[in-house]
C-alpha cells in the first residue's frame, strides 16, 4: 500500500464559525485569522494505492460553482485535484473508489464536473464506485434548513443517477485495509475511514477533528449540527486514539498534515506533528 496526500487548494472561513464558543483571543493564538476574521483552511484529500485499487478520500470543492458562490470562500493556493494526482502519475480516470466522508460542498464538490460544452453534469471519476453512508445521503437530499446551504444537489444527485453510488449501511471494512465508522455530531452519518497501513492505523479526520487546534474537547465548530454529540464523540475518539496510537491525518489544517496524541496534565494533547511522507522517520 502507498499513501499520497492530495492537495486541492485552500478556502477561507470565518474563524468564529470554525471554533464555536471558544473566544477569538484564545483560538487566534493557535490558528490565526486575517483582519476580516477569516482563517485559511486546507482541502487536503488522501489517495490510497493498494494493489489494483486506487482509492481517493474526499475531493475538494471542484470547479463548477459560479463566481457568486465562490466569492464567499476566497479560494487560494496553486494546487488542484488534477495537478496533485498528476504529480503522482495518476488521472481522475484511474480512481477505482471514491470515499466521501460527507456531502458538504468542500468535501465532495469535485465528484461531479461539467461536460465539455457545459450543458450537463458528469462524473469526474467515471470509473469509480462512490461510497458514502446511507444516513448522510438521506440527510443531504432532504436537508435541514440550518445545513441546506452546504448540500448542493448538483454535487449529489448526479452520482445516484449515474449508478455509481454505493451506500454504506453499517460500520465495517468496506475495502481491504479500510474500515469506516460513523459520527453524527457534525452532520448525520459522517464517514471516518480507519486505514491499516503497515500495522499502523491512520485516521482520515474530515470534520470530526478539522485541525490540531480542535483537539481540546470544547473546541467544536459552530457548523456542527449537534455540538453536544460532537463533544462526546470527540472525547471517545481521542481516548481511543491515544490507547491505540492512531495517526491523525487532517483534511483542513493548513499548518499540520498529521499528528499523534498523548495524555498530558490537561487531558489528551498533540504529541508530534509531521508530514505523512515522514511517517516512519518520526516513529
Image: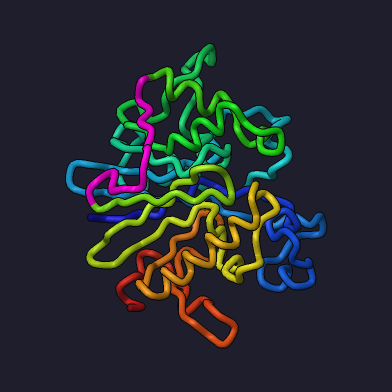
**Residue at 66% from the left image edge and 72% from the top image edge:** 30
Residue that appears at 40% across and 54% down: 5
On the image, the x and y values in percent for residue 134 come to: 44, 34
Q: Which residues are magenta?
A: 163-176
Image height check: is 269 above or below 131? below
Tell me how many marks there are.
0
Left or right: residue 2 compared with residue 260: left
Decide if residue 78 is in sight here. no
**Display colour scheme:** rainbow
* Residue at 61% from the left image edge and 71% from the top image edge: 216
Residue 240 visible in rendering: yes
93 to the left or right of 70: left
Q: Quadrant of the N terminus?
A: bottom left
Nearer to the camera, 104 or 64: 104
Quarter residue 214 falls in: bottom right
Which image quadrant: the C terminus? bottom left
Q: Which residue lies at the image location 65% right of the left edge and 60% below the top edge?
A: 220
Q: From the top left corner, tell me how far across and down residue 232 is, in percent.
A: 56, 62
Is residue 175 shown in magenta? yes
Is 58 drawn above or below residue 20 in the view shown? above
Quarter occupied by residue 125: top left
* Residue 149 point in image, percent of width and height: 68, 34
Q: Position of residue 12 (x, y in %)?
A: 68, 50
Q: Was residue 86 drawn as part of the magenta stretch in this picture?
A: no
User: Can you name the residue that lies furthest to the left here?
Assistant: 51
Nearest to the observer: residue 169 or residue 219: 169
Q: Is residue 26 left or right of residue 105?
A: right
**Residue that sits furthest to the bottom in the current view:** 265
> Taking 273 as reference, is 117 above or below it?
above
Amino acid at each position: 500500500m502507498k499513501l499520497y496526500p492530495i492537495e486541492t487548494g485552500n478556502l477561507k472561513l470565518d474563524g468564529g464559525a470554525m471554533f464555536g464558543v471558544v473566544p477569538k483571543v484564545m483560538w487566534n493564538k493557535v490558528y490565526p485569522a486575517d483582519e476580516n476574521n477569516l482563517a485559511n483552511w486546507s482541502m487536503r484529500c488522501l489517495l490510497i494505492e493498494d494493489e489494483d485499487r486506487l482509492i481517493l478520500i474526499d475531493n475538494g470543492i471542484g470547479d463548477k460553482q459560479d463566481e457568486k458562490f465562490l466569492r464567499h470562500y476566497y479560494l487560494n493556493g496553486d494546487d488542484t485535484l488534477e495537478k496533485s494526482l498528476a504529480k503522482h502519475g495518476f488521472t481522475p480516470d484511474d480512481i477505482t473508489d471514491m470515499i466521501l466522508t460527507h456531502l458538504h460542498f468542500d468535501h465532495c464538490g469535485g465528484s461531479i464536473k461539467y461536460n465539455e460544452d457545459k450543458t450537463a453534469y458528469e462524473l469526474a471519476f467515471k470509473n469509480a464506485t462512490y461510497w458514502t453512508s446511507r444516513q448522510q445521503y438521506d440527510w443531504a437530499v432532504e436537508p435541514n434548513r440550518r445545513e441546506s446551504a452546504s448540500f448542493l444537489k448538483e454535487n449529489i444527485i448526479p452520482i445516484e443517477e449515474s449508478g455509481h453510488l454505493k451506500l454504506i449501511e453499517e460500520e465495517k471494512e468496506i475495502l481491504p485495509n479500510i474500515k469506516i465508522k460513523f459520527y453524527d455530531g457534525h452532520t448525520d452519518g459522517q464517514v471516518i475511514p480507519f486505514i491499516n497501513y503497515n500495522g499502523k492505523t491512520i485516521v482520515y479526520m474530515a470534520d470530526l477533528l478539522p485541525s490540531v487546534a480542535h483537539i481540546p474537547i470544547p473546541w467544536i465548530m459552530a457548523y456542527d449540527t449537534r455540538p453536544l454529540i460532537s463533544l462526546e464523540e470527540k472525547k471517545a475518539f481521542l481516548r481511543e486514539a491515544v490507547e491505540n496510537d492512531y495517526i491523525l491525518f487532517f483534511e483542513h489544517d493548513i499548518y499540520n498534515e498529521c499528528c499523534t496524541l498523548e495524555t498530558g496534565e490537561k487531558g489528551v494533547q498533540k504529541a508530534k506533528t509531521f508530514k505523512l511522507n515522514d511517517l516512519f522517520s518520526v516513529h
